[in-house]
Amino acid sequence: MDVRSYRPSDDEQREDLQLRYPVAPGVSGCRRYRRLVAHAEMYEHHRTFVAEHEGKVVGIVSGALKCVWVRGEPLKVGYFFDMRVAPQARRQGVASALYSHVESAMREDGAAGAYLIVMTANTAVRPLTQRIGLEQTALVETVAVPVQRRQRVRADVRTLSSSAAMAEQVDSHFAGHDLFVPGLERYPVSGRFTRYYAQTGSSFAGVTQSTHGCAFEEVIQPKSVWTPAMRGLLRALSVAGPVPAIPVREQPVSTWQLGEPVIAGPEGERLFQDVVSHVNNLALESDVDWLLLPLVKNDPLHRSLRRAFFARRLCPMLRPFLTVQAVLLVKSLTEAFPRRLERIYLDARDF
Ligand SMILES: CC(C)(COP(=O)(O)OP(=O)(O)OC[C@H]1O[C@@H](n2cnc3c(N)ncnc32)[C@H](O)[C@@H]1OP(=O)(O)O)[C@@H](O)C(=O)NCCC(=O)NCCS
């Protein structure tokens, strides 16, 4: 088996390299890439390696080199993502070889540390990440709400769509966070980023909406054995409030990612509810199925963001089912990179 840099002709085999992953017990996800490097191209500096065996591509991984802030200092870090190995080539060291190539490439490019995000339900990948020396630094939970009906919005929600204006607003809130990428780089055109915010007096709330639809289609589905039981449960719960529709087998779901959430001041939580309701109404017009918001669990704002995101939108009994757990793993490649990170910024491009 050889590991080499990606070539455009590798796209002919892209169907064999869809990313299939467990999301939660009984739920799986599949990412169908439009081109193998479409997601990687959302980053300014990226590298993709493939593993080739007997003329066939059997595995792939991407890495992005980012200039971030860590403990108030600028540092280069490598972010690794979208690793997958064709089922027939697993347990033969392909992922290990791909990882070692992408890590060496990032070291050569000057990365002081590396990180990646793994779903907690993906137990297959954890022994591999442990062996590589990646250590858990934070829990990340992605909360999801179905887009179902128009919601009332009381606040005056405003929109920013120029990257410069978004960067100016967001930079001031996240500048002290670890892994924060300052400036315009985090809003590539392919992700179609828009910021929504509301303010009153000293209170403020805002969120950035994006879509990865240019890079891949996502298919999230419950395993078939659960589906009839889940449909029955949801029908029963629908008397108590809106409930999500279960995705239909093999049909892609359309999602909007929310990121860079901010709540500030005494009215911040209420404003955040209005901002999300406003986004919900726009999503409804665009036939979007779900809104997703990744949150760092030990962030001081975590509880209020979670509460405000779910408020008005989902029957409380269903909330635990619509929370997907992941871990953020890090590795120091030089002494400049600390083993533990503190308040962590989540980059919308990473999800
Ligand atoms: C996870 C994945 C990339 C591993 O690829 P791989 O080429 O089989 O991995 P390797 O052969 O290099 O395995 C290295 C070690 O990881 C661990 N490992 C890999 N797959 C495992 C599994 N299914 N169960 C338990 N441990 C596993 C083992 O410790 C293994 O070493 P061993 O075979 O000597 O015991 C592959 O299973 C895959 O593509 N899964 C679907 C996509 C995915 O989950 N990607 C990761 C997203 S972060």
Image (tube, helix red, strand yellow):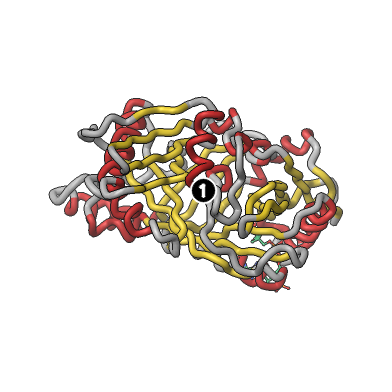
Question: Which residue shows up at 45% across the image and 47% down it?
Answer: 220
In the displayed structure, 338 sits above or below 181; it is: below
Where residue 140 appears, x then y in whole percent? 48, 59
- In the rendered structure, the answer to whether residue 30 lies left or right of residue 200 reads right
Residue 331 visible somewhere in the drawing: yes
Question: Which residue shows up at 44% across the image and 42% down it?
Answer: 258
In the displayed structure, 149 sits above or below 122; it is: above
- Residue flagged by tag 1: what amino acid is it? Phe
Question: Which residue shows up at 35% across the image and 42% down it?
Answer: 205
Q: Nearer the viewer, residue 96 or 59?
A: 96
Disc count in the image? 1
Question: Which residue shows up at 70% across the image and 37% down it?
Answer: 44
Callout 1: SS: helix
Q: Nearer the viewer, residue 283 or 108?
A: 108
Where residue 260 appears, x then y in whole percent? 47, 45
In the displayed structure, 134 sits above or below 258; it is: below
The residue wearing badge 1 is 174
Mark 1, ligand 1, within 8 Å: the answer is: no
Where residue 118 appears, x then y in whole percent? 57, 60
